[in-house]
Image (spheres, grey):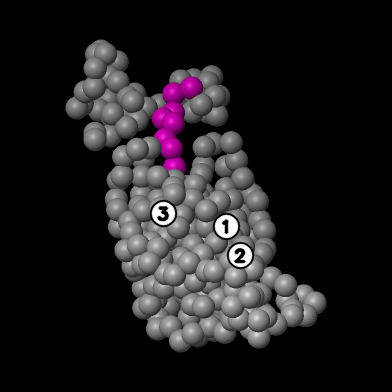
Amino acid sequence: MALQDVCKWQAPETWGPSTHLPQAGGWAIPQGCNLQTFLQMHGPRLAHGTTTLAFRFRHGVIAAADTRSSCGSYVACPSSCKVIPVHPHLLGTTSGTSADCVTWYRVLQRELRLRELREGQLPSVASAAKLLSVMMSRYRGLDLCVATALCGWDRSGPALFYVYSDGTHLQGDIFSVGSGSPYAYGVLDRNYHYDMTIQEAYALARCAVAHATHRDAYSGGSVDLFHVRESGWEYVSRNDACVLYMELQKLPEPEPEGKASQAHPESVIPHRAGECGKLSSEPGEVSAEDSRMPAKTETL
């Protein structure tokens, strides 16, 4: 699909699509016209879609994302990387306009490097998130579209922040951004707990993104998985999202609670206060490359 077809641009002298771009002066904003009004009237309206997630747990921060870059119904790239490293202990997920995300991460990398040279040490994750939100908030209302989760490890331990292009700046344990985030949240909210093992965290992130890519038309491709440790970030794996979902479908379905309690009355263990949300089964051994959910999360 041609770029002029995607943007619905037409040459001034013709009514049909043209292979010739206008002169440089043709893109100039007319004198006396408000920039925001001009963009709303003449700017292209392109749909965005993706699935990115990040969560903090005992052993660091997990970041995962799909790899499909789309422009409306057109898949521009099926294997893009939506997790961008900032420095050895900080990376971020990207959702929104790809060009805006890449540009602002380059600006953030430059500013953090300058601060490191001035102060002799890297800023904290909270400082980096605040800096990014302040810089982008100046362009509020100009169709800037950047939604990111900054994942890092600093002197205070693992940290996770959500930053949006209008200046929103939030700290939390779980964030999912993109059109597939409602489906990812459904998996994360049911199975997440802070004391997970590393293999449980890997399996949970893969499962959440795989389910989101199956339900969301704008998400797909593969599942990229990153792990931020005290020693720095690590690229764990890239798995095909369709294969992951098919493997999850082959897992045995859980038995109803009534039948399970009648068949194995000795396995019913009362929960203590504060543990009602945890499963009583012990997790099994799972390799780093195993895409199946462990015992705590394979009941999806």
Q: Helix, strand, or loop for circle 2?
A: helix
In the rendered image of this protein, does residue 22 appear above or below residue 129?
A: above
The quarter of the picture where residue 230 lies is: bottom right
Q: Amino acid at mark 2?
A: Arg
Q: Earlier in the sequence, mark 1 or mark 3?
A: 1
Is mark 2 in CB contact (under 8 Å) with mark 1? Answer: yes
Q: Quadrant of the N terminus?
A: top left
**Circle nearer the viewer, 3 or 2:** 2
Q: Is the stretch drawn in magenta largely helix, strand or loop? A: loop
Q: Is residue 254 visible?
A: yes
Q: Say which residue appears at 43% left-offset and 83% top-offset.
A: 286
Of residue 225 and residue 9, the one placed in the foreground of this image is 225
Q: Amino acid at mark 3?
A: Thr
Can you name the residue that lies furthest to the front here?
A: 262
Task: Give the Cα distance between marks 1 and 3.
Answer: 13 Å
Q: Which residues are magenta?
A: 41-48
Percent coordinates x, y for residue 221 in the rendering: 33, 56
Left or right: where 86 falls relative to 264: left
**Residue on which the image places disc 3:** 213
**For residue 46: magenta?**
yes
In the rendered image of this protein, does residue 45 appear above or below residue 263?
A: above
**Residue on which the image places disc 2:** 190
Task: Give the Cα distance between marks 3 and 2.
Answer: 18 Å
Q: Helix, strand, or loop for circle 3?
A: helix
**Residue on which the image places disc 1:** 186
Q: Say which residue appears at 46% left-offset and 86% top-offset.
A: 285
